Structures are given as structure tokens and as C-alpha cells.
Amino acid sequence: MNETVREWIAKAEGDYWTANRELHASEWLNYDAVCFHSQQCIEKLMKAVLIHRSTVPPRIHDLVQLDRVLASSVPDWSWPVEELRFLTRAAVGYRYPGEMADQEEATQALDICVRPRERLLALLEELE
């Protein structure tokens, strides 16, 4: 595993633990941040797998599009599109005024994040 892949993983893990801490904070909870960092974790891990497979990841943030690229590089990869859409929408939609995440949406974002994170980390180990 090269240094670039390791850095993507470290950044993804930082996002994962930030989302976790924020969801369980006792003051000044920021549910928008939970959603954003949950999406960022998966985006960065998908890109880490692509780089590890010698594929240059596209400069996009849409997890559904990244999923398609990843599936073409790793044939046994697939993830429910509706979950990837939720994370993508949650990360982008809540960054701007007019829409705010609530506890239920933040919990759902982190719950979704946990499963592909585990699978992507395992996939990186398998590809080693």
C-alpha cells in the first residue's frame, strides 16, 4: 500500500471519528457535520481503493458515481444506491442555509457510513 492510499485512509478515519464524536457531543451538536463527515469518510475510502487499484479517482463527490467507477475496478463491489444517495444528499444539502439535519438524519447517515466503511477497509486489506 503506498503513502497516498494510507493518507486517504487516515483522512477517511478522521472524518469517521469526527462524525462519531459530533453525534455524541453533549453541547453544540452539529447534525449537519455528522452527515458531511459520514459522506466524506466513504468518499475518501472509495478513492483509496481506486488508487490502490491503480485507477485515478474522478474529482467528484457523488457516491453513486464513485460506486460505478469502483464497481468497474473491483468486480465484487456493490452497495445499495439508495444509501449512497442519502449520504451524498446529506453531505451537500445540509451545507447551505435553508436545510438542516436533525438527530434522526444524522444518526441514519452515521449508521449507513459504518457498513461500507467496514467493507471498504476490509477490501483494502484483501487487496494488499
Image (tube, rainbow, N blue to C red):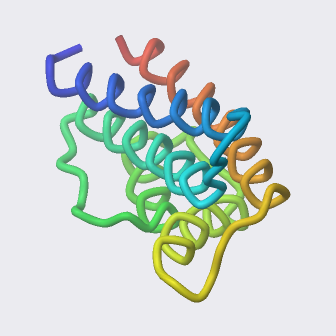
Q: Is residue 118 left or right of residue 111?
A: left
Image quadrant occupied by the N terminus: top left
Q: Which is more toward the observer, 21 or 7?
A: 21
Examine the rendered structure and indicate whether residue 6 appears above or below residue 47. Answer: above
Residue 115 x %, y %: 70, 35
Q: Residue furthest right?
A: 104
Q: Residue at x 54, y 77 (%)?
A: 93
Residue 104 x %, y %: 85, 58
Examine the rendered structure and indicate whether residue 60 appears above or below residue 76. Answer: below
Image quadrant occupied by the C terminus: top left
Quarter of the image for residue 31 reads bottom right
Q: Residue furthest bottom?
A: 98
Q: Is residue 85 left or right of residue 97?
A: right
Examine the rendered structure and indicate whether residue 35 appears above or below residue 95. Answer: above
Q: Residue at x 37, y 42 (%)?
A: 44
Q: Residue at x 45, y 12 (%)?
A: 125
Residue 58 x %, y %: 24, 61
Q: Residue furthest front?
A: 27
Q: Which is more toward the observer, 96 or 117?
A: 96
Residue 70 x %, y %: 42, 49
Query: How many discs appear?
Result: 0
Q: Residue at x 61, y 53 (%)?
A: 30
Q: Is residue 61 left or right of residue 57?
A: right
